[in-house]
Each structure stands twice: as C-alpha cells, then as structure tokens.
Image (tube, helix red, strand yellow):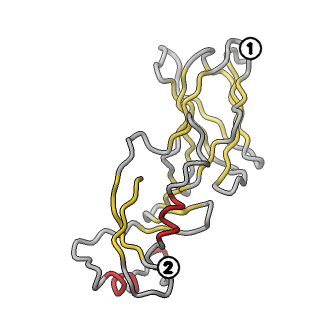
Amino acid sequence: GGKKGSTTEGKLVDGQGQPLSGISVTFKQVRPVAGTEQLEARTGIDGIFRISGLQPDSEYIITPISDKWTTKVTLKITTGKEGQPLVLSSPIVIRFTVLAKGTIIDTKTGLQWLIYTATDISAGNVLNTIKTIREGGFNDWRLPTKAELSELQDKSTSSAEQSESPSANETCCVWTAERNSDKVEWEFYID
C-alpha cells in the first residue's frame, strides 16, 4: 500500500523571489503522536517541495535546513484532511542566511552583514576598527547606512504565519555612517 495521510506542497525562495533548490525541509509535529517521526523533503530545481505521509489535520513546524547556511525562518502549518493536499498559497521566503563564520547574507540586497562584537569601540575608533576586519576574505567592510538599516526592517516580504524569530521585537543599536563619510552615528532599530 502507498503512504496514507496528508500531502503538503510548497516552495522556498530567496529575498529576490528566486527558487532555492536542494534544501532539506523538515516537518515536525507540534503535538507529536506516538509513532510519528519527523519527516523530511527536499526542494527541486524549481524550489518546490512535496511531502506525503503527514498526519491529516495536524499542526507541523516546517524548518528549512541547508548544509551551507542556517536561517531562523520557520512556518507553522495545519495539514489538510485525509486525501486533501495542502498547497501553500505563498512561497516561504528566506531573506537572511547565516554562514558558518557568522556572516549574514541579505539575499534581497546582496549585502553581507557581520555582527562584530568588541567592547572598546567608540565613535572615534569605529571606522579604523572596521578597516582592519578581514572576515570572510573581504577587506571592504563598512558601517551600514541609515537607509540600509531601515530596509532591514521591511516586513512586507514576510507573510503573517511565517516567522523569522520566535521572540518579540527587540530594540538595539548599531553604528551607522553614510558612504564616504567620516560622520559616525549611533542608531537605534527594532529587530
């Protein structure tokens, strides 16, 4: 006999809407029933994944997993009734990916972000500190601009049920400087 249960289909895309292929997608039941293990699917060249054998009418957390990067993106779904496939109405958007060394790639803008933690940074030495960073083989690191910071807070790309972090909004701060400027500012933002 074939696999009984519910079928779910969806698509993974990056920040520019391009399909993400070869990505594992795990399905973990929110309230596991005995004998139901975590199931896994893989995205095709078109970014589409399909999985059968899920418990009908059950809540699952979908988590994308790559061997090249990590993401905080998850999606909670409720599967269809027996024999009724669930097709996700909009793609799962993975805009930010974190590489092994801690560099964050914004797949919408192509910018790479480095969360650089140092205790002795001040407005006076922050620009010189950045000039010495060689992370990821790059030597052209710079402070973000105010426009880039506000662009990071663009929530229009994510759908209501998709979340990139389980926590509430966090306010923090970051040094900013406009391109080719020596004027450094301390900017607050909401994560």
- Name the residue rendered at 51%, 50% in the picture: 71
**Reading the chain from its start, which is encountered first: label 2 or label 1?**
1
Q: How many marks?
A: 2
Q: Nearer the viewer, residue 181 or 45?
A: 181
Q: Nearer the viewer, residue 62 or 23?
A: 62
In this rendering, is residue 13 above or below 52? below
Amino acid type, label 1: Gly
In this rendering, is residue 52 above or below 168? above
In this rendering, is residue 55 above or below 42? above
SS at mark 2 in the image: helix
Q: Nearer the viewer, residue 116 or 47?
A: 116
* Among the 4 quarters of the image, the one containing residue 114: bottom left
Query: Residue tagged by mark 1?
Result: 83
- Name the residue rendered at 22%, 71% in the picture: 119
From the viewer's perspective, tell me whether residue 9 is left or right of residue 171.
right
Q: Position of residue 155 (x, y in %)?
A: 55, 49
SS at mark 1 in the image: loop
- Name the residue rendered at 73%, 41% in the picture: 48
From the viewer's perspective, tell me whether residue 174 is left or right of residue 49.
left
Pick out the residue farthest to the left: 120
Query: Residue tagged by mark 2?
Result: 137
Q: Position of residue 27 (x, y in %)?
A: 56, 31
